[in-house]
Structure formats: structure tokens, C-alpha cells
């Protein structure tokens, strides 16, 4: 399979490598010429055989919308655009309708795996028609974890179904990290408890709270037991807010995820202790920037 990939940052660059390792021919474009295979979107499209498949991995919002608009002018009937970024699901219907005016297909795909996806594979949640998805299936198979039948799911035929599922995934992630962080803060504060990193490590085997997030937190705590090097500040990248908005629109009670979102806003106002653990976990799974103490 030949595929174009736009956006070669922390995830996109690793995705290019993983697809190439699986035997796919990947033409990558990024604004950074040092990592690009071609010097323009036009050159990327010209390098692909028809029907052309182009995967977009750029920041959500206007960067994605403008990239897809540019591709609309360059691609033609039977070609396909995949939005693999963290776009809001409501954008997908508009992008799909716009591309359909020229007979260009559209698939939205929520991608989870962070900076570890190159080694472990990515969880892929996609939306769109089965016929459009078939055009990109070799890439899906190359990117998903290789040792499981899970990790790749068709979330629905409507554009946006994949990004909606990824949005809810990230909302759950917010609540899980908040629970770990609050537990860490309490354990770290009381005098009777010693060796907090190894307490967390002991939970990784045989307990109901074991998870990859827990593994990442243990790594961070072993490197900096009290997380003294971090400020208690954690960004929210959008999906948590969108999840809460969707819950309100659909009258779905979501107290834990809502509380975890508002907890991040506390970190805008002061050096929140529990937020250090969330910042550490975000850095561990996604390479997200942390704010260090000066």
C-alpha cells in the first residue's frame, strides 16, 4: 500500500516508521523540512498512485480543517482522506461533506498509544463507511498492536464515530489519572506510610487497579519520589471538555469525569500537589510537556 502522511511529530513520525516496517510505502510531509520526504502537499499528492490515501496527523481545529481544505483541491474522485488527529467529532461531518462534493472519501480515526505506539502499536477507533475504511485497512493493520485481535474497531458508519469514541476514552483517562493522583497525594502526605513508589508498584500485579497508567506513574515516582521537580500544573487538551459537553447534551450523568476536568482547572490557580502526578503520567504516555520548578 502507498499512503501519504501529513504531520510527522511525536506520533506521526513513529507511525510512519511502524507502517514502513510493515512494508507500506509512506510519503511523509511536515512543515519541518528535516523530517519530510517531500517539500509540499502538492509533491506528496503527486507521489501517490491512484486511488490516493492521505492520512492527516496535525493539531485539531484550524490546522486540520485548513489541511483538509487544501487536500480537497489536490485530490479527486475515489481518493480518501483520513483524519487521525484529536479532532472534535462535530468537525468530521463538515469535513466529510466538503470532501464528498468532489467524490473524495473520509474516515475519522481516533488514535491512542502516545510515544509508545511505535513499539506497542496503536489503538485505533475509526468511523466512516466500510468501503472507505477498506482503502486504508492495510495501514490500520500495520499500526494496531500485533499480538491481539483487539486494538482496531469500527465505531460507526457516520463520520465522527471514531473521534467520539476516542473522546470518551480520553475522558475516562482523565478520571483514572485523577484517582491515582489523589491516592498518591494522600499516601505521600501521611507519616506512617513509607516507600510510596513501591506501594504503587505492588498494585501492578494481582489488583483490580492495575493499568498502564499505573506502570507509568511508578516509573515517574521511582525517578522522583515526591515529584519535587514538577509544578502541579496539567493541561487539558480538549477531549475532556468535549466529553463533558456531550454528556450534558445527552443528559448522561458524568460526575467522576467532570470532577477530574475541573480539578485540572485548579492547577491554573496554584501549585496543586495531586496535579504533579497527572503531569507525570501525561509526560510518560504521550511525551506531553511538563512545567518544571524554576
Image (spheres, rainbow, N blue to C red):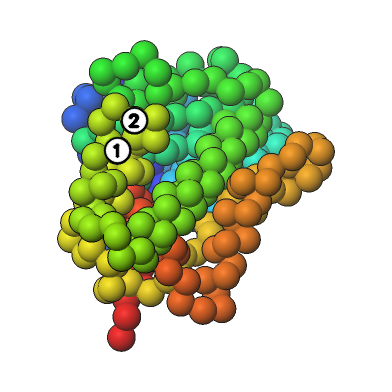
Query: Does residue 118 show up?
Result: no
Give the crowd class for mark 1: few <14, some 14-19, many >=20 residues within 10 Å: some
Q: Secondary structure at mark 1?
A: loop
Q: In which image quadrant can residue 28 be found?
A: top left
Horizontal arrangement in the rendering, residue 102 relative to residue 56 (left or right): right
At x 27%, y 73%, the residue is 229
Q: Which mark is residue 279?
A: none
Image spot of residue 285 (x, y percent): 33, 48
Q: Residue at x 38, y 74 (%)?
A: 231
Relative to 79, say whether 9 is above or below: below
The correct choice, above or below, for 271 with respect to 154 in the image is below
Left or right: residue 21 versus residue 169 is left
Q: Is residue 89 visible?
A: yes
Q: CA distance from mark 1 to mark 2?
A: 6 Å
Q: Nearer the viewer, residue 169 or 85?
A: 169
Whether residues under marks 1 and 2 lie with C-beta atoms below 8 angstroms apart, the answer is yes
Foreground residue, 141 or 246?
246
Residue at x 23%, y 43% (from the top left corner): 201
Q: Left or right? Give the position of 187 relative to 107.
A: left
Image coords of residue 162 (percent x, y): 57, 31
Q: Which residue is mark 2?
A: 207
Q: Residue 204 at x, y = what percent?
A: 27, 36
Helix, strand, or loop for circle 2? loop
Q: Residues within 10 Å of mark 2 (few under 14, many from 20)?
A: few
Numbered marks: total: 2
Image quadrant containing the C terminus: bottom left
Looking at the picture, tell me which residue is in the foreground, 231 or 82: 231
Which numbered circle lies on residue 203?
1
Residue 157: x %, y % from top left = 65, 21
278 lies above or below 172? below
Amino acid at each position: 500500500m502507498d499512503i501519504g502522511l501529513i504531520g510527522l511529530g511525536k506520533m506521526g513520525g513513529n507511525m510512519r516508521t511502524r507502517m514502513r516496517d510493515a512494508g507500506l510505502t509512506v510519503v511523509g510531509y511536515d512543515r519541518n523540512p528535516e523530517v519530510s520526504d517531500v517539500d509540499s502537499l502538492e509533491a506528496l499528492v503527486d507521489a501517490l498512485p491512484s486511488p490516493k490515501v492521505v492520512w492527516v496527523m496535525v493539531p485539531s481545529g484550524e490546522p486540520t480543517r485548513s489541511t483538509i481544505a487544501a487536500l480537497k483541491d489536490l485530490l479527486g474522485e475515489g481518493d480518501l482522506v483520513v483524519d487521525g488527529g484529536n479532532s472534535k467529532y462535530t468537525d468530521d461531518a463538515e469535513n466529510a461533506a466538503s470532501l464528498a462534493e468532489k467524490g473524495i472519501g473520509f474516515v475519522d480515526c481516533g488514535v491512542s498509544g502516545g510515544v509508545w505506539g511505535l513499539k506497542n502499536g496503536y489503538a485505533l477507533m475509526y468511523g466512516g463507511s466500510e468501503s472507505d475504511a477498506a482503502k486504508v485497512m492495510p495501514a490500520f493493520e500495520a499500526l494496531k498492536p500485533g499480538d491481539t485481535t483487539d486494538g482496531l474497531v469500527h465505531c460507526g458508519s457516520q463520520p465522527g464515530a471514531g473521534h467520539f469514541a476516542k473522546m470518551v476514552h480520553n475522558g475516562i483517562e482523565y478520571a483514572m489519572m485523577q484517582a491515582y493522583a489523589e491516592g498518591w497525594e494522600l499516601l505521600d502526605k501521611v507519616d506512617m506510610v513509607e516507600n510510596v513508589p513501591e506501594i504503587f508498584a505492588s498494585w501492578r500485579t494481582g489488583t483490580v487497579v492495575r493499568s498502564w497508567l499505573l506502570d507509568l506513574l511508578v516509573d515517574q515516582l521511582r525517578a522522583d519520589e515526591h515529584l519535587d521537580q514538577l509544578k502541579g500544573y496539567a493541561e487539558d487538551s480538549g477531549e475532556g471538555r468535549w466529553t463533558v459537553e456531550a454528556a450534558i447534551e445527552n443528559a448522561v450523568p458524568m460526575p467522576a469525569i467532570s470532577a477530574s476536568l475541573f480539578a485540572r482547572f485548579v492547577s491554573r490557580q496554584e501549585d496543586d500537589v495531586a496535579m504533579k502526578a497527572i503531569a507525570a503520567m501525561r509526560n510518560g504516555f504521550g511525551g506531553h510537556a511538563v512545567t518544571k520548578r524554576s
